[in-house]
Amino acid sequence: ALAEGGALGGGEGVDAAFAPDVVLRDGEIVTGAGWRIEAIATPGHFGNHVCLAWEGTVFTGDHVMSWATTMVSPPDGDIGDFMASLEKLLARPGDRRYLPGHGAPLDEPERMLRHQLGHRRAREAQILATLDGAPGTPASLARRIYTETPEALLPAAARNVLAHLLDLHRRGRVACDGPPGAGTVYRLA
């Protein structure tokens, strides 16, 4: 519903014309001669993101990277879903190695999952603390929070801030005048 009005922006990298040959459901198994791959629905970075598990190795795509947390850009990305998907991966026994779409292999996936969960929780706390000082738009909050970030990367930072603000708004922690959007001013509820 939020995407319909266009106030959220986003859509980075979306190939609207792409239609997969097969849509895999969570837990679906694909097999071949001597191999078996399990689809793990991991929405968050993108609404239809999946990871693929094969013999203790998980191909994590863009959901878990080895060098940073992934960008979550509404309306296609949802920080609440992202966090739930990290928790879902954390709860899987037997996954010993992650092969991300970006960065080096991860041989301690639990450590990275816990790091990313902690990082996102800390970012949420930082956003709330910044709002305690003064209301702001996602872009103005990003400037106040990401003080060491190069100017060229601030638009991406603002997308992540927006994802957090939408989640905080859903949970009643922040409020805004009018509909939530990329240019909306948010404040503590």
Image: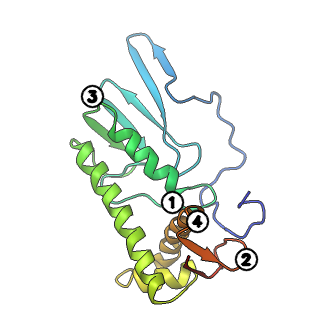
- In the image shown, does 81 or 28 lie closer to the viewer? 81
> Of the residues shown, which amino acid type is indicated by label 4?
Leu
> Of the residues shown, which amino acid type is indicated by label 2?
Gly
**What whole-number distance in Å separates the C-alpha atoms at marks 2 and 4?**
13 Å
Q: Quadrant of the C terminus?
A: bottom right
User: Would you name the residue on which mark 2 appears?
Assistant: 178
Q: Where residue 7 sits: x, y (%)? A: 72, 70
User: Would you name the residue on which mark 3 appears?
Assistant: 94
N-terminal of the two: label 3 or label 1?
1
N-terminal of the two: label 2 or label 1?
1
The residue carrying pointer 1 sits among few (fewer than 14), some (14 to 19) or many (20 or more) residues within 10 Å by Cα, namely many
User: Would you name the residue on which mark 4 appears?
Assistant: 166
> Of the residues shown, which amino acid type is indicated by label 3?
Gly
**What whole-number distance in Å separates the C-alpha atoms at marks 3 and 1?**
27 Å
> Of the residues shown, which amino acid type is indicated by label 1?
Val
* Secondary structure under the numbered disc 1 in the rendered image: loop
N-terminal of the two: label 1 or label 4?
1
Q: Is residue 60 left or right of residue 165?
A: left
Q: Residue at x 47, y 61 (%)?
A: 71
In the displayed structure, 85 sits above or below 34; it is below
Which label sits in the foreground, 2 or 3?
Answer: 2
Which label sits in the foreground, 1 or 4?
Answer: 4
**What whole-number distance in Å separates the C-alpha atoms at marks 2 and 3?**
47 Å
Q: Residue at x 38, y 71 (%)?
A: 125
Looking at this rendering, what residue extends furthest in the bottom direction?
134
Q: Is residue 132 left or right of residue 162?
A: left
N-terminal of the two: label 3 or label 4?
3
* Secondary structure under the numbered disc 2 in the rendered image: loop
User: Would you name the residue on which mark 1 appears?
Assistant: 72
